[in-house]
Amino acid sequence: MDEPSMPTPPASTTHPPPLSSPPGPPTPPIPLAELLASKDLGLRRIAGPAEAELLWVHTSEMADPYPYLLGGELLLSAGVLLTDPDHYVGRLVEAGAAALGFGVRPVHETVPGALIEACDRQGLPLLEVPPETPFTAIARAVWRLMAEARHRELRRVTRAQQALATAAARPDPVPAVLHQLATQLGGRAVLLTARGEEVHAAGRRLPPEPAGALTRLARVVARERPGSPASATDTHGDTHLSAYALGGGDGLVLALAAGRRESGDHTVAGIAVVLLSLLAAPHQGADAAGRSAALVRMLLGAAPAEVAPLLGATGPWSVIHARRTDGTPADGLTAGALGASLGTALVDAGRGGGEAVRLLLPLPGAAEGGAARPLPEAEAEADRIAPQPGWTLGASAPTPITALDAADSLAARALAHAQATRAPLTVDAPVSGLAALVPPEQAAAHARALLAPLTAPLADTLRCWLSLHGSWDRTAVALGVHRNTVRQRIGRCGELLDADLDDMDVRAELWFALRQGRGGRGVTDEFRRPPLSYG
């Protein structure tokens, strides 16, 4: 492995450069070849390597200009005090000069042969400056090339920033940002945990050795202990490696590998670090972590009395179920980004098995430890739940803490309805109109008597079939069964109820009953109207 650009001691710690090290210029370096291509200057390389990067231009006639050099200079001299070319070149190389421009006349008629030999021997590019070319013209040309390079870099960074911001707005923001970053840098971008485990990756895969070197570099910046650097760079053969610690304190690291390193790469990577830090952040402190735990416990059936103190607000709340529109599973980071878009940190995405992401959304005005908002106001806020690109959502109506378990079931049904109708969002909302005029107790009693012959699966199938206007195919999609199964169940419902399900009056009465409390052997729901779909 080549020497890393940041000192990396064996103890896997990286120290910043000495305080005396000068900062680089605010402009990108200029390849020596670009300066030589300026025909009007008449410069000619007569010794040393062809490749070099110029950071500054400096003129000096001192016998030893070493104390006044920062490194990366094109040093211009007429050799007024040149007496020992070998020592002179050695000091320039030691100071980190990029190249030497030697002006002929009036001091020297030609470039001294000993100087040419010394530059060849010590690897310092040597340029012959013709008598008609002032040193100021060379300096002006370098500054012009730097300004052009800076303009190109700014345009590249601006385009990359726009592309990364667009990727961050996608339904799968973290993989999308990594993919765009790998494209912009022409390499591989990996999001790693503090232990070196890969969370997401994009770009061409690395061979085992550079991949291992990248993982080791990532551990250097992983914030598992105080004093870890925010970033580090290294090289492995021809592969340039870099690692950046993400904000949030979870030890996540952005690791990059590319075959080339261009001006602006660090800035582009910095933009990605900011975006990924926001996207991958837990969006919660200690109190929100307790709320997330409360969500999990609630969904597992904890009593409302146990959940309420942890949630800290009496409501109302809306339970949301979500699936990716393309059917791909959502990981924790993607689900967290969805929660951030909806305005909640209460996200349950870790159950696996292809189940939906579940979110608990506090509606605006849910008071911490106070009274719930009036239901009409809460319903208006629930209507403002917006569809999310790349997601299919099902949301419950505003619900108090005591009814979150029922709201969870309603959100699941709303999601099934949204998938069946290909709507991006379906909201199950409270009833209104004529049905609201019937006293709930009488309605529930009538529903229990009418639906007593039906089992829970049959009642759920009948409810879904009626909500989808008798569509066999959509009901099959919503329930996840074959359309023939739907036909058999609906036929069985007609037999048990001794009713003609093609009669609109029968359908209306059954729909009214199915929206009531508990009927027969497991029919459950609240007094509600059909879900609202947005699409």
Image: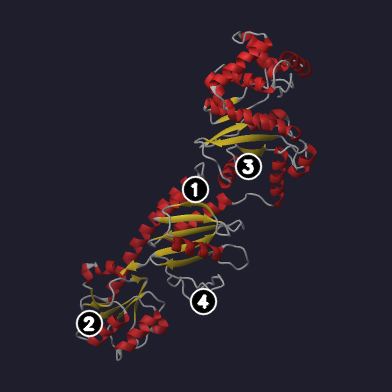
For residue 452, side relative to residue 534 (left or right): right
Confirm or deny contact between disc 2 and disc 1 (CB under 8 A).
no
Is any part of residue 468 visible from this angle?
Answer: no
Q: Nearer the viewer, mark 3 or mark 4?
A: 3
Badge 4: few (under 14), some or many (20 or more) residues near its Cα, within 10 Å?
A: few
What is the three-letter code of the residue carrying label 4?
Pro
Q: Label 4's element?
A: loop
**75 w.r.t. 467: above or below:** below
State the mark number for residue 18.
Answer: 4
Dot 4 or dot 2: first in sequence order is 4
- From mark 4 to mark 1, how far is it between C-alphas? 37 Å
For residue 476, side relative to residue 463 (left or right): left
Give the residue at mark 3: 351
State the mark number for residue 175.
Answer: 1
**475 w.r.t. 44: above or below:** above
Q: Nearer the viewer, mark 3 or mark 2?
A: 3
